[in-house]
Image (spheres, helix red, strand yellow):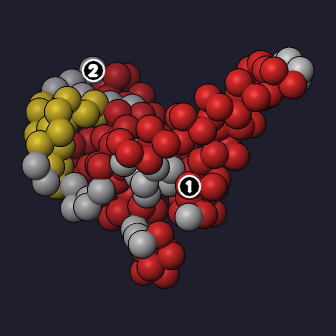
Amino acid sequence: MKRKLSFIVLLAIYWLSLSGHYSPLLLALGAASITLVAILSQRMGIVDRDGRPTHLVPRIPMFLLWLIKEITISSLAVLRIVINGRYRPTVGRVKTGQTTQLGIATLANCITLTPGTLSLRILPGEIEVHSLDRALLEELQNGDMPERVYAFDRPDASEEHRDA
């Protein structure tokens, strides 16, 4: 219920910020629009944990700090590869271990944000990755990125009971 209510409040704030008009007729039409969108979204099943990941909000700052550190380390590795001129492009697969679509998408985006690697395709249980160098791919396969993303997106047992 909390997720549905926050969705409606977010829609109302968004509509009011885009509208800029507060006459009674426009407010009534806006309320009708928000109600219709909320009902349709509920029937479509998109007001769920993945569609409104409010559980991630407290975890975002630490995750972003970790991701910035990874991007910086990878940038330096790519700089070393470019300066040395030792390119060994390769394609490989990284196991995901993710249980949600949001977790898989987050991992694929983190891989792409990290310089020298690019997510090519999402397969069952793994992501196909192009890497500028074999060492970057091995670091991704043996590193802790999939585990960090899983920890970021892990379900909280207490929240699952609240949303049920």
Picture disc at residue 85: 2
Around disc 1, counting alpha carbons within 10 Å, would you say few (fewer than 14), some (14 to 19), or many (20 or more)? some
Q: Quadrant of the N terminus?
A: bottom right
Residue 64 is situated, as x and y percent measured from the top left of the image, at 57, 50
Marks 2 & 1, CB-CB < 8 Å contact:
no
Left or right position of 101 against 34:
left
Q: Quadrant of residue 31?
A: top right
Q: Quadrant of residue 146?
A: bottom left
Distance, label 2 to label 1, CA atoms, is: 53 Å
| Picture residue at 11% right of the left edge, 43% below the top | 123
Residue 91 is situated, as x and y percent measured from the top left of the image, at 11, 33
Left or right position of 122 against 11:
left
Name above or below for residue 88 compared with residue 71.
Answer: above
Eye-nearest disc, 2 or 1: 1
| Picture residue at 20% right of the left edge, 29% below the top | 120
Name above or below for residue 28 compared with residue 151.
Answer: above
Q: Is any part of residue 53 visible from this angle?
A: yes
Q: Amino acid at mark 2?
A: Gly
Picture disc at residue 113: none
Left or right position of 56 against 104:
right
To which residue does mark 1 refer?
4
| Picture residue at 10% right of the left edge, 49% below the top | 124
